[in-house]
Image (cartoon, rainbow, N blue to C red):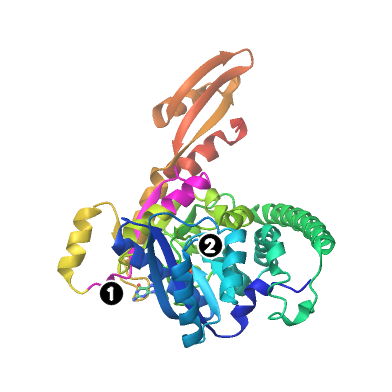
């Protein structure tokens, strides 16, 4: 079986056509933003968008998405412009892709396929590579039949005849076994990460989250003097970096930078990148980095919140950080944003604007967080009960035979003090 034929285009510049087929009456401005984003994704993957087609439809054709007339029109455009790849902004089914490829005689992929390619291209660590491979195989499985035989002439390695159904069944079985192996490998990697994480537990943890290209890695580098790769490309970061830095009070803390989110992140990728995406789960406070210069910033905010929700990490304390304020045209614009988002911070990670203020807010928000501790004070240490009641928020109490059991709410700022005094008596 040839390797990743559907993603071959990442290795040579392609002339691509972008299509967005939508039902009539949808918001046109939003549609244009989506197709701009598709163009940015294509560029990142190494393809030039030569032409863009927006097709408003009464209904989506189940076999080919668009109608016969449009197919002919596009065929002509493909010939005239020597286009080698068609990219749909819509999700298309394997059957639709196969039918369209038969018509156009070139490769047809959708947004998910494109994102998958970018991930494959940018994966560096074993974990990221394994996660991408898993997502690719899951994506490939239902599409296996369309690789053969109608495209066999274009793909060198396949041979002229094209395998029959038996061959496809064998390939399917091989892929399914491989998928299982990759899943087990990821579980192993996860276990190793747990071991590495030990010892870091007591430091305050902050995590950068946000839409891809918002400036998370730039801010990471600014705050922690790390050298995470920064690029004007989508999904420049696919792995997680954790670094220490100092809060204004001089205490050490941890900051993590990880993969960015995007509207409609493909399900296969969410599933296989779950552990990397959920890196923010361990954080005490999240920093949501928003690109203030992007016209679609509100949609991007929503996409990030939806992804956090899908990963079950929406309820963490979040500081909204609007980045790239240096790109705003005037102060008036910034003031308007500040009115709209009174609790947010406004920075430029690149120019280092307002970073000390951000660090101050990070410290404040961390200190406001609290945890509930269960403790049992033996009757021989009853003097500690006074300290407990005078300094902390006792939420429940049970007088047992061998001591007094309490649940105590402690704000992070008082953690060290609490732990020093009650260390022997903390149950959890
Ligand atoms: N003008 C300006 N550009 C910025 C600023 N911060 C980041 N950038 C640029 O925005 C682009 C993306 O920055 P990254 O830090 O790679 O963004 P990211 O959020 O880590 O992106 P992914 O890793 O792809 O999710 C780069 O070209 C940066 O130079 C800023 O404050 N102002
Ligand atoms: Mg990054």
Residue 345 shows in this picture: yes
* Image-based side of 68 in relation to 368, left or right: right
Disc 1 C-beta below 8 A from ligand 1: yes
Across and down, in percent, residue 214 comes to 40, 67
Q: In the image shown, does 187 or 168 lie closer to the viewer? A: 168
Q: Which residue is drawn at the image coordinates 68% and 56% (left, top)?
A: 193
> Which residue lies under the disc numbered 2?
64
Across and down, in percent, residue 124 comes to 64, 72
Q: Residues within 10 Å of mark 1 (few under 14, many from 20)?
A: few
Segment colored magenta: 304-328
> Which residue lies under the disc numbered 1?
327
Q: Residues within 10 Å of mark 2 (few under 14, many from 20)?
A: some
Disc 2 C-beta below 8 A from ligand 1: no
* Image-based side of 5 in relation to 50, left or right: right
Compared to 229, does 340 lie above or below?
A: above
Q: Which is nearer the N-term, disc 1 or disc 2?
A: 2
Callout 2: helix, strand or loop? Answer: loop
* Image-based side of 27 in relation to 404, left or right: left
Displayed-image quarter of ligand 1: bottom left
């Amino acid at each position: 079986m040839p390797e990743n034929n559907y993603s071959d285009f990442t290795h040579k510049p392609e002339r691509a056509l972008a299509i967005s087929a939508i039902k009539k009456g949808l918001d046109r401005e939003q549609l244009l933003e989506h197709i701009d984003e598709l163009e940015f994704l294509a560029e990142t993957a190494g393809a030039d968008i030569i032409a863009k087609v927006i097709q408003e439809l009464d209904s989506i054709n189940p076999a080919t998405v668009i109608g016969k007339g449009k197919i002919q029109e596009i065929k002509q455009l493909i010939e005239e412009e020597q286009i080698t790849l068609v990219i749909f902004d819509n999700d298309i089914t394997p059957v639709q892709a196969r039918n369209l490829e038969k018509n156009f005689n070139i490769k047809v992929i959708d947004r998910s396929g494109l994102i998958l390619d970018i991930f494959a291209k940018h994966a560096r660590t074993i974990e990221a590579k394994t996660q991408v491979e898993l997502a690719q195989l899951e994506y490939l499985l239902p599409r296996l039949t369309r690789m053969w035989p109608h495209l066999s002439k274009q793909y060198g390695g396949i041979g002229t005849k094209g395998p029959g159904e038996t061959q496809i069944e064998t390939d399917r079985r091989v892929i399914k076994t491989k998928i299982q192996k990759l899943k087990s490998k990821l579980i192993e990697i996860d276990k190793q990460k747990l071991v590495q994480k030990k010892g870091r537990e007591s430091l305050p943890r902050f995590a950068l989250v946000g839409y891809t290209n918002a400036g998370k890695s730039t801010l990471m580098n600014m705050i922690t003097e790390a050298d995470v790769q920064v690029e004007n490309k989508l999904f420049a970061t696919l792995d997680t970096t954790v670094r220490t830095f100092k809060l204004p009070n001089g205490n050490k803390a941890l900051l993590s930078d990880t993969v960015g989110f995007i509207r409609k992140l493909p399900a296969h990728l969410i599933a296989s990148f779950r552990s990397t995406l959920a890196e923010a789960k361990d954080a005490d406070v999240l920093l949501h980095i928003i690109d203030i210069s992007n016209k679609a910033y509100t949609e991007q905010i929503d996409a990030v919140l939806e992804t956090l929700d899908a990963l079950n990490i929406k309820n963490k304390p979040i500081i909204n950080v609007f980045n790239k304020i240096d790109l705003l045209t005037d102060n008036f614009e910034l003031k308007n944003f500040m009115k709209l988002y009174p609790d947010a911070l406004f920075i430029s990670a690149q120019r280092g604007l307002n970073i000390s203020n951000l660090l101050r807010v990070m410290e404040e928000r961390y200190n406001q967080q609290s945890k509930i501790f269960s403790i049992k004070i033996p009757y021989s240490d009853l003097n500690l009960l006074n300290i407990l009641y005078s300094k902390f928020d006792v939420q429940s109490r049970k007088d047992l035979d061998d001591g007094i059991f309490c649940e105590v709410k402690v704000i992070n700022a008082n953690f060290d003090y609490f732990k020093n005094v009650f260390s022997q008596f903390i149950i959890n």
